[in-house]
């Protein structure tokens, strides 16, 4: 019997290790030979821990599993109360277009043989054939835009670094993934880490960079461990180091662990942090592509941008660009989180609507109450009411509605949410995480919390609302980066779309 | 965890990281891992050995939320306070726990058993609310689950 039990952090957080141990014990008791593989997660988190048993028809799933559910796996699996059928036929999974996440949850994350058997390192082989200029052209043609938030074309960034002259260049992977509601980087680092190693190696060859860093947030201990192991194994297999894959190119990389600062996800703050300093945002220009880590030309990309590169080179730019709409090409790993019935990672071509994702795919709220608001794009993203659920998943369509896709997170709230509190939280978060360089961000956000507190207490709501609006304008105009500059989005969208939550009668401060 | 300052241990940590391009953050991580916090003495030694000013070390330690300059309790419980966890009621659960323990965020129980700290997202946002106890992750933590976890940390 071959049984898969995920080792992804979300599976572990919901008891996967105990389930795995129980399976081993039960198999031993029954004298059944069971081979346990610890795979990554398929990203269907409402089913985690999702145990899969290999059958002639395919892998059949059981979830969410508890220790008490284990003996039943050995009795009559077909009648098991947690049986969910063939995993790849579950609608949430079957409706996806998995290009970037094709291997995630399927393979043993640290088995290089498995990785290669599922198409791994075909992209690097192609990259070596194409050479630096050829790779940059291919990435440009794919239409890939940065998945970290700003949506900047990846190929253009690489070309800038490629043509820069320097004795040393760097590739930096931004795996700081601080946005609430996002876990795509984490899922891949734990479920398919070699794809990031391969993607960074290709970036190195394309730009002439020989050293790479993966900046992983400290909140991701499992990702850190898995990436370190994957890097060591790749090095052992001569897929990192001198003459990568017997080519004339050298590339090696290491993990760098963050220290709990949201602003270090901003690329220049991240570089300062890597240099051992406080993570403060640098003014641009100069661009990191020209003056980056230690003052050298540096490619800095989000983890998903980088680990999507191998599949683009393997299948071709044209193939990738055929997915999507408008100027948003390819697929986006949408992450559905919060108060949601079926939360998880849904990779789909751009163009799907917000409503389809929230209502059809995710099945509405976990609480069973009506959906009231969805925050798209993390703590700096706007709140969308259901009346805007026809918005298509596309960079430009979101911008038109004063929102942003960001890193692809969606956080769902039911009708018990108090949007004045959420607006307050946005300001509070900004105050907590501000790097301190700009007054509107550092002081304005603290002031914002105070003013929203007055509104919540029913003190002169009209006057204080217009004060918040002024504050937001000042923050937008006077902030160096998007932390101060975009905090107005969640605040103003809450006020605009949910005005009733800001018009409460005066009441004592202590009341809920 | 060992709360006493042992210069030879700090020295060993620094030596182990000297090969890195910029060792400061990795050194601070390792010191906190070893001692549970970063003491004045440790900062002084790090500044000396890495040839940077004490102000620089202090500036870095105070900038990052991870670093503690006071000892923590024997167990550290980090509760997620970010939006996805809020949507599943994390704030009310946390408030109830803190009230029962008589703590504010970042506080340690009088018996030195438990420190409760905020964290902003653990990447478990589809299994909210979530928490980390001594480095172990926990998801789908309702009020009862959280209370159980806090009591388990004995
Ligand atoms: C406050 C702030 C936080 C950010 N956090 C992240 C992050 O966690 N991960 C990320 O990839 N990009 C983050 N970004 C965006 C980065 O600055 C940058 O645009 C990105 O790393 C570029 O990579 P890409 O082109 O592949 O998206 C953040 C930006 C800001 C202003
Ligand atoms: S907007 Fe805020 S976080 Fe960004 S640079 Fe200014 S002070 Fe720092
Ligand atoms: S918001 Fe709590 S784990 Fe992401």
Image (cartoon, coloured by chain):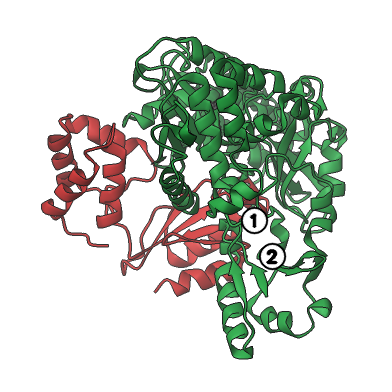
Chain colours: A green, B red
Nearer to me, A140 or A326 = A140
> Callout 1: helix, strand or loop?
loop
Residue on which the image places disc 2: A50
Q: Gap in Å between the C-alphas at discs 2 and 1?
A: 8 Å
Residue A234: image x %, image y %? 46, 45
Disc 2: which chain? A
Quarter of the image where one finds residue B143 = bottom right
Determine the quadrant in which ligand 1 lies.
top right
Quarter of the image where one finds residue A451 = top right
- Residue A428: mark: none
Callout 2 crowding tier (Cα within 10 Å): few <14, some 14–19, many ≥20: many
Residue on which the image places disc 1: A41
Callout 1 crowding tier (Cα within 10 Å): few <14, some 14–19, many ≥20: many
Residue at 61%, 78% in the rendered image: A23
Instruction: Tell me: residue A189, above or below residue A497.
Output: below
Q: Mark 2 near ligand 3 (CB under 8 Å)?
A: no
**On the rendered structure, is A486 left or right of B45?**
right
Q: State the residue lying farthest toward the front.
A: A246
Instruction: Tell me: residue B132, above or below residue B66.
Output: below
Q: Quadrant of the N terminus of chain A?
A: bottom right
Can residue A398 be seen at all in this image of the molecule? no
Nearer to me, A336 or A502 = A336
Residue A88: image x %, image y %? 80, 56
């Amino acid at each position: 019997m071959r049984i898969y039990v995920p080792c992804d952090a979300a599976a572990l957080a919901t008891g996967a290790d105990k389930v795995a141990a129980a399976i081993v014990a039960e198999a031993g008791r029954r004298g059944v030979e069971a081979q346990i593989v610890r795979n990554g997660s398929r990203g269907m988190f409402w089913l985690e821990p999702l145990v899969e048993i290999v059958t002639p028809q395919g892998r059949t799933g059981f979830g969410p599993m508890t220790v008490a559910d284990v003996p039943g796996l050995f009795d009559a699996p077909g009648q098991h109360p947690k049986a969910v059928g063939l995993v790849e036929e579950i609608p949430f999974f079957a409706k996806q277009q998995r290009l970037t996440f094709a291997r995630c949850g399927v393979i043993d994350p640290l088995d290089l043989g498995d990785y290669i058997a599922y198409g791994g390192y075909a992209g690097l082989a192609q990259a070596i054939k194409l050479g630096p200029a050829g790779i940059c052209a291919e990435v440009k043609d794919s239409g890939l835009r940065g998945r970290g938030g700003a949506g900047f074309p990846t190929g253009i960034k690489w070309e800038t670094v490629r043509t820069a002259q320097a004795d040393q260049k760097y590739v930096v992977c931004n795996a700081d993934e601080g946005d609430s509601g996002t876990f795509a980087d984490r899922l891949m680092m734990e479920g398919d880490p070699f794809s990031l190693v391969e993607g960074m190696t290709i970036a190195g060859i394309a730009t002439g960079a020989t050293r790479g860093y993966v900046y992983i947030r400290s909140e991701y201990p499992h990702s850190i461990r898995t990436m370190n192991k994957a890097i060591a194994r790749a090095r052992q297999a001569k897929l990192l180091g001198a003459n990568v894959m017997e080519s004339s190119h050298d590339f090696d990389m290491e993990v760098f662990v963050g220290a709990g600062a949201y602003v270090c996800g901003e690329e220049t703050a991240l570089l300062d942090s890597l240099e051992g300093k406080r993570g403060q945002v640098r003014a641009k220009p100069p661009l990191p592509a020209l003056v980056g880590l230690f003052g050298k030309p540096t490619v800095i990309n989000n983890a998903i941008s980088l680990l999507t590169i191998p599949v683009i080179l393997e299948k071709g730019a044209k193939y990738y660009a055929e997915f999507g709409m408008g100027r948003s090409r390819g697929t986006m790993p949408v992450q559905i989180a919060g108060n949601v019935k079926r939360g998880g990672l849904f990779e789909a071509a751009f163009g799907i609507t917000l409503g389809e994702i929230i209502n059809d795919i995710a099945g509405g709220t976990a609480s069973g109450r009506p959906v009231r608001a969805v925050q798209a794009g993390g703590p700096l993203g706007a709140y969308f009411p259901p009346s805007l659920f026809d918005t298509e998943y596309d960079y430009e369509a979101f911008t038109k509605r004063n929102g942003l896709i960001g890193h692809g997170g969606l956080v769902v709230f039911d009708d018990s949410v108090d949007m004045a509190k959420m607006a307050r939280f946005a300001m509070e978060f900004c105050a907590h995480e501000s790097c301190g360089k700009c007054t509107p961000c550092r002081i304005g956000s603290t002031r914002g919390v105070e003013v929203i507190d007055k509104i919540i207490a029913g003190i002169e709501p009209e006057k204080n609302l217009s004060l918040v609006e002024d504050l937001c304008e000042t923050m937008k105009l006077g902030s160096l980066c998007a932390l101060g500059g975009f905090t107005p989005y969640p605040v103003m969208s809450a006020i605009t779309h949910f005005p009733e939550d800001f018009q409460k009668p005066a009441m004592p401060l202590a009341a809920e | 965890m060992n709360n006493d300052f042992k210069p030879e241990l700090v020295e060993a940590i620094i030596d182990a990281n000297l090969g890195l391009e910029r060792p400061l953050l990795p050194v601070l991580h390792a010191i906190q891992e070893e001692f549970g916090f970063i003491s004045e003495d440790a900062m002084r030694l790090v500044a000396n050995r890495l040839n940077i000013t004490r102000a620089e070390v202090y500036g870095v330690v105070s900038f990052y939320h991870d670093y503690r300059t006071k000892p923590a309790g024997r167990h550290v419980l980090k509760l997620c306070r970010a939006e996805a966890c809020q949507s599943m009621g994390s704030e009310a659960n946390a408030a109830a726990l803190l009230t029962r323990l008589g703590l504010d965020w970042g506080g340690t129980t009088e018996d030195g058993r438990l420190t409760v700290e905020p964290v902003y997202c653990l990447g478990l946002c589809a299994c909210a609310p979530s928490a980390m106890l001594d480095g172990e992750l926990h998801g789908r933590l309702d009020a009862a689950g959280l209370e159980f976890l806090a009591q388990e940390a004995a």
